Image (cartoon, rainbow, N blue to C red):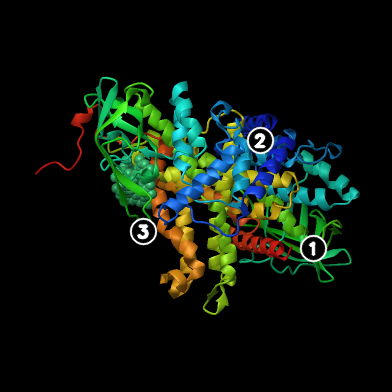
């Protein structure tokens, strides 16, 4: 039993942190937030040169051939930096889908491009507001042509490739769509976190290829995997928000002493620290389950997802509060974190959805144990 | 990262399980963390018999050195043992203070003679130990304690009062911290002793808890004589020794949080209806339970992370405060919630509401757990100051000799 990342993994993490400190300070996130650019293209390219997009892609397809523990470390650093790049949708979902369910031809067509950053992937899943992850899908496929509307699609305006959930002969499956093809109309949507873009995509007889290896459970499994990696991204963001807040409250004096000397602040900082540690422990467990394809993954993914989303959001709420008036200004960075926390919590189904899923999965396990 | 046992760990686990299967019955129900039951002679006897049985087979205090009767096992092996033992019905434990706090303190600060004198009988369960720290005016502010010891020849003469002393009525020995110099700053004037609880001049009076149990006591000292060879560490070094006890206390209370039982709420929900529908279909019920489970599992995995740090030779720091801080309030909320699920009959007790009994027991015992071994507020201060490096509270006793420290509202 050893419940920690290895020294090599930590070294990789440090390299990622150094790179992002140099190439993605918070001003990079702000630039994207304030401009019309959908993502930081130079950073995306640099990340690919560092091998991050291809972290778990085998070397034969141009990837680094690492495991998911290494990818989790990178995800954490991407989260810490609030890096404004389409990392999660492309790496945690689209790449995973092809790796797990793609044919040899699909793999050689797309994985090298995903690895070197020349292609951005995304997951086109939900179709209407209020829909959580796994509810009814209306998009349909007939004779290799896909029709339907997907909303929202994270990075759907810039992606080259979409993994689309759709029905064919009444069965839900996953389909690859080259977004350069015809019968595709995309529209950028206003994003609550403008440092990350959102779109809607209308497919009208667009050419698609089935990911033949995907069975009925594939979508749920894919979301589980993405949830674990996203949890690391969220915990990275939460850690950074707490660090920035800590530095501020120690330096800011009111009533003749640091505001951090008041228990009203200190104690809430301690509670936030506990929230984040609880999230980190759940995420470590889930990362282990992911890396080992363990049967615990479905439950562990829920635990990681719920804890990380809640910890990140709570930390950013207090971040603004503890900064006082300046925390409420556009100029200070607090709102970058506040927005990103909500943006990440909305992807892949909200915490509310995952909480219900957790109870389902625990009940099923219990039922199975009793039957045995 | 690896959650699975190594071959050596698996072998150790199998050995532990085999012994437990031969010597105990598998666990069938969840048991409350702190029992409201009195510490009856029968319970003490059962607990001692179980401890003796374990000691005879080398399964008691397994991380302690072999030369004093331990097994010299690693922290990981200890955790494996704990996991396995938790699957079996075992008698209420009257040794948690002795083994969790007193033993480690003596092993850290005692002389070889002192270790030889006390540790073996602690392991075999022949002698039960208690912790005489808190006083009526010194709980969170432990260093404000006023019980005094004055040296007379080879002995110390102790006068004063301790309170909240768990188990004092059944103990042979107690660890005691007292003031030996009131003229210096409060932390500097303390000294640490081991005292025999049958010494002349000691009077023990039980206190009844809100759950009617009588786990803790007042202990009065009137000219109690303690030989100088029962002093632990130097005169004036009592605070440093006490900190060792407190660090161990938090770890041992925290690790026994019983958060595993939180998951029983999933099954509990199956048997309950809310307005004619199964509670298991109520989304709010489900989401609350999910939040409890996330915290409980997070604590469980945190303890495994601590263990990994231990096995890499790192000492667990003040982070260990988290498990009690988060775990106690989590259980209190979970118990409150479980009671609420019974609707109007949540106000019933005993045979009228059998399914709830265990949760009610917890609801009544958890307030004690939030206070014992450092209140929530003190633990938050520790995390804020020691982990996050935030500034200490402003204090009114700084730089004062103990005798000059304010102890109540100013006189009108
Ligand atoms: C939307 C908005 C409108 C405003 N409009 C006006 C206006 O019209 N006129 C005007 O004069 N001002 C206005 N203000 C200023 C406002 O009154 C101050 O921002 C507020 O009093 C906090 O002061 P501060 O920003 O200096 O933060 P600080 O005082 O530095 O506080 C930072 C953090 O420390 C905490 N803190 C500080 N002292 C303590 C303590 N003793 N105990 C516990 N916690 C403490 C605070 O609660 C906060 O979380 C406005 C502010 C906002 C956000
Ligand atoms: C079930 C139980 C078993 C116990 N067993 C033992 C035992 O075996 N041996 C032993 O020595 N003691 C024992 N104790 C005592 C326990 O350690 C003390 O009760 C505890 O440390 C709190 O001290 P107090 O009761 O004097 O409360 P106080 O210290 O007076 O605290 C009262 C309230 O004020 C708050 N407070 C105090 N100081 C601060 C501060 N600086 N900042 C913010 N809030 C503050 C506290 O958090 C608390 O809410 C036991 C207690 C219980 C409940």
Chain for numbered disc 3: B
Q: CA distance from mark 2 to mark 3?
A: 47 Å
Marks 1 and 2 close (CB-CB < 8 Å): no
Which residue is at 70% across, 47% downward? A289
Q: Is residue A107 shown left or right of residue B167?
A: right
Q: Is residue B73 left or right of residue B6?
A: left
- Kindly indicate whether the residues beneath marks 2 and 3 are on one polypeptide chain: no
Give whichever of A299, B316 is nearer the camera.
B316
Residue nearest the viewer, comparing A32 with B185: B185
Vertical comparison of A48 with A206: above or below: above
Residue A135 lies in quadrant = bottom right
Residue B321 in view in this figure: no
Mark 3–mark 1 Cα distance, whole angstroms, equals 56 Å
Q: Foreground mark, 3 or 1? A: 3
Q: Do the CB atoms of the residues marked 3 and 1 lie less than 8 Å apart?
A: no
Q: If you read the primary sequence from the N terminus, does the residue marked by circle 1 or circle 2 appear first?
A: 2
Q: Which residue is mark 3?
A: B212
Question: Residue A323 location, x and y as percent?
Answer: 41, 43
Residue A111 locus on image (x, y percent): 82, 44
In this rendering, position of residue B412 left or right of residue A92? left
Point out which mark residue A216 bears: 1
Does residue B204 lie above or below B267 as drawn? above
Q: Secondary structure at mark 3?
A: loop
Q: Which residue is mark 2?
A: A5
Q: Quadrant of residue A347?
A: bottom right
Question: Vertically, is A162 above or below A169?
Answer: above
């Amino acid at each position: 039993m050893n419940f920690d990342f290895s020294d090599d993994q930590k070294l990789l993490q440090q390299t990622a942190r150094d790179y992002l400190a140099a190439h993605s300070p918070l001003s990079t996130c702000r630039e994207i937030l304030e401009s019309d650019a959908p993502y930081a293209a130079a950073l995306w390219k640099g990340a690919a040169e560092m091998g991050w997009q291809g972290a778990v892609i085998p070397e034969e397809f141009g990837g680094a051939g690492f495991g998911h523990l290494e990818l989790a470390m990178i995800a954490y650093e991407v989260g810490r930096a609030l890096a404004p790049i389409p990392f999660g949708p492309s790496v945690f979902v689209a790449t995973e889908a092809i790796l797990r369910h793609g044919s040899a031809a699909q793999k050689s067509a797309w994985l090298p491009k995903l690895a070197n950053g020349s292609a951005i992937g995304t997951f086109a899943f939900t179709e209407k507001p209020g829909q959580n992850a796994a509810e009814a899908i209306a998009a349909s496929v007939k004779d290799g042509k896909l029709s339907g509307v997907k909303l929202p699609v994270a990075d759907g305006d810039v992606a080259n490739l979409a993994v689309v959930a759709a029905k064919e002969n009444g069965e839900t499956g996953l389909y690859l769509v080259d977004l350069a093809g015809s019968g595709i109309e995309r529209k950028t949507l206003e994003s609550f976190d403008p440092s990350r873009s959102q779109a809607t995509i209308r497919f009208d007889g667009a050419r698609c290829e089935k990911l033949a290896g995907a069975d009925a459970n594939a979508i749920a499994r894919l979301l589980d995997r993405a949830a674990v990696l996203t949890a690391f991204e969220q915990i990275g963001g939460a850690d950074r928000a707490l660090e920035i807040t800590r530095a501020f409250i120690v330096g800011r004096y009111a009533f003749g002493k640091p505001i951090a000397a008041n228990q009203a602040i200190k104690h809430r900082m301690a509670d936030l620290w506990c929230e984040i540690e609880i999230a980190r422990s759940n995420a470590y467990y889930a990362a282990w389950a992911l890396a080992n394809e363990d049967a615990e993954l479905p439950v562990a993914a829920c635990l990681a997802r719920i804890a990380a989303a809640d910890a990140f959001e709570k930390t950013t709420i207090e971040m603004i509060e503890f900064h006082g008036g300046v925390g409420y200004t556009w100029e200070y960075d607090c709102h970058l974190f506040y927005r990103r926390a909500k943006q990440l919590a909305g992807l892949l189904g909200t915490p509310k959805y995952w909480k219900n899923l957790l109870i389902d999965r625990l009940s099923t396990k219990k039922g199975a144990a009793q039957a045995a | 990262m690896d959650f699975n046992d190594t071959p050596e760990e698996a072998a150790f686990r199998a050995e532990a399980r085999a012994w437990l299967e031969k010597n105990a019955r598998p666990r069938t129900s969840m048991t409350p963390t702190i029992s409201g039951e009195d510490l009856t002679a029968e319970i003490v006897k059962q607990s001692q018999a179980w401890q003796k049985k374990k000691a005879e087979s080398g399964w008691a205090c397994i991380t302690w050195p072999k030369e004093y009767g331990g097994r010299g096992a690693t922290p990981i092996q200890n955790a494996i043992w704990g996991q396995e033992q938790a699957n079996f019905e075992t008698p209420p434990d009257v040794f948690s203070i002795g083994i969790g706090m007193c033993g480690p303190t003596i092993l850290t600060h005692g002389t070889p003679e002192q270790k030889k004198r006390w540790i073996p009988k602690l392991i075999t369960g022949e002698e039960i130990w208690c912790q005489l720290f808190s006083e009526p005016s010194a709980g969170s502010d432990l260093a404000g304690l006023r019980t005094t010891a004055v040296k007379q020849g080879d002995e110390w003469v102790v006068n004063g009062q301790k309170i909240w002393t768990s188990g004092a009525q059944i103990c042979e020995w107690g660890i005691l911290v007292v003031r030996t110099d009131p003229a210096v700053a409060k932390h500097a004037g303390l000294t640490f002793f081991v005292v025999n609880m049958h010494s002349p001049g000691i009077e023990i009076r039980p206190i009844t808890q809100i759950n009617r149990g009588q786990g803790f006591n007042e202990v009065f000292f009137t000219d109690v004589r303690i030989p100088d060879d029962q002093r632990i560490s130097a005169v004036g070094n009592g605070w440093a020794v006490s900190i060792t006890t407190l660090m161990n206390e938090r770890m041992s209370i925290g690790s026994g949080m019983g958060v595993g039982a939180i998951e029983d709420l999933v099954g509990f929900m199956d048997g309950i209806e809310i307005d004619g529908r199964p509670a298991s279909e109520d989304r709010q019920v489900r989401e609350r339970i999910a939040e409890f489970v996330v915290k409980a599992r997070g604590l469980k995995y945190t303890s495994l992370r601590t263990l990994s740090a231990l096995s890499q030779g790192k000492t667990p720091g003040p982070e260990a405060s988290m498990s009690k801080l988060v775990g106690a309030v989590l259980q209190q909320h979970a118990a409150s919630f479980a009671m609420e699920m019974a609707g109007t009959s949540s106000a019933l007790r005993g045979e009228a509401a059998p399914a709830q009994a265990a949760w009610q027991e917890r609801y009544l015992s958890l307030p004690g757990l939030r206070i014992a071994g450092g209140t929530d507020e003190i633990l938050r201060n520790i995390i804020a100051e020691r982990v996050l490096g935030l500034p200490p509270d402003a204090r009114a006793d700084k730089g004062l000799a103990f005798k000059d420290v304010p102890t109540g509202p100013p006189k009108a």
